[in-house]
Amino acid sequence: MKLGRVIGRVVSTVKVESFEGIKLLLIQPLDEKLVNVGDPIVSFDTIGAGEGELVYYETSKEAGRVLETVMNPCDAAIMGIVDEVFVNDKK
């Protein structure tokens, strides 16, 4: 799983049938120190995350398992909302 912050919404009036009724959010990927890593991505939200929230998400084949339809073109899906992150700094 990966960390990210919700930075916006994506509105799509026409989409494949298996995506109907699913909210799309724009996520900025983060590292373990909550620093931006890479470009923002579009992700499905089936848990009710909101803008500014820290989330964990999955990509690839595992992301598609969030939806009831087995065969769908999902690339990223939010799996949960993160309350806190603790990192032990080792030198």
Image (spheres, helix red, strand yellow):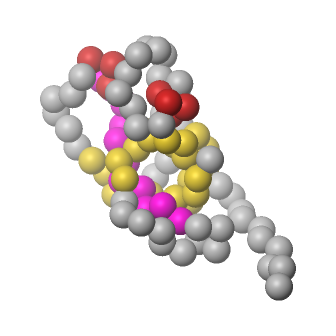
- Measuring 27% from the left and 17% from the top, which residue is drawn there? 17
In the depicted view, which residue is nearer to us: 37 or 3?
A: 37
Residue 2 place in picture, x, y as percent: 58, 53
Q: In which quarter of the image is residue 71?
A: top left
Image vertical order of residue 36 relative to residue 63, above or below: below
Residue 12 place in picture, x, y as percent: 20, 38
Q: Residue furthest left?
A: 14
- Measuring 37% from the left and 60% from the top, which residue is drawn there? 40
Q: Is residue 26 magenta?
A: yes
- Measuring 52% from the left and 59% from the top, which residue is drawn there? 4
Residue 30 place in picture, x, y as percent: 53, 65
Image vertical order of residue 42 relative to residue 6, above or below: above
In the depicted view, which residue is nearer to us: 37 or 79?
A: 37
Magenta segment, which residues?
A: 20-30
Quarter of the image for the C terminus: give it. Answer: bottom right
Q: In which quarter of the image is residue 43?
A: top left
Residue 78 seen: yes
Residue 36 lies left or right of residue 26; in this view the side is: right
Image vertical order of residue 77 relative to residue 54, above or below: above
Residue 6 place in picture, x, y as percent: 44, 58
In the depicted view, which residue is nearer to us: 20 or 91?
A: 91
